[in-house]
Image (cartoon, rainbow, N blue to C red):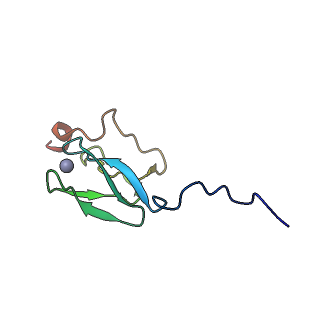
Amino acid sequence: MAAGDRNVTSSQSDDRISIVCYHCDKPQDVSRKAQSLTCKFCYKSLKLQDESIQQYAARRAIETIGIVTVEHDVIVPAGGADRDRAAR
Ligand SMILES: [Zn+2]
């Protein structure tokens, strides 16, 4: 008998994750499977999928809750989600 393969403590919230909206900083629970959603506080769209950056993207705001993967020697300035930089 193989016991202890899985340590199941609660199956209720397995498909929910907690995220913080990057527009209004409000925490909320969303489905783990969701690729995007609309914030229920500020009604702006949020991306949840991982984002891959393959070009120099300093002029573009990086906005995703997922993992940001930077390819090659792309330089992303500190505070990559700074809208002031994106406006140039
Ligand atoms: Zn929001």
Is residue 53 something that shows in the picture? no
Residue 65 position (above or below residue 80)? below
Please identify the quadrant where the C terminus is shown.
top left
**Residue that appears at 24% across and 46% down:** 59
- Place residue 39 in its image quadrant: bottom left
Towards the viewer: 44 or 8: 8
Residue with the most extreme right position: 1
Q: Residue at x 24, y 40 (%)?
A: 25
Give the quarter of the image for residue 32. bottom left
Q: Is residue 56 above or below residue 11?
A: above
Q: Nearer the viewer, residue 81 or 65?
A: 65
Residue 27 in sight in this render: yes
The spot of residue 38 in percent (x, y) is 21, 60
Q: Number of callouts in the render? A: 0
The percent coordinates of residue 84 (x first, y second) are: 16, 37
Where is residue 18? Give x, y as percent: 38, 50
- Frontmost residue, 50 versus 22: 22
Residue at screen point 14% across, 51% down:
42
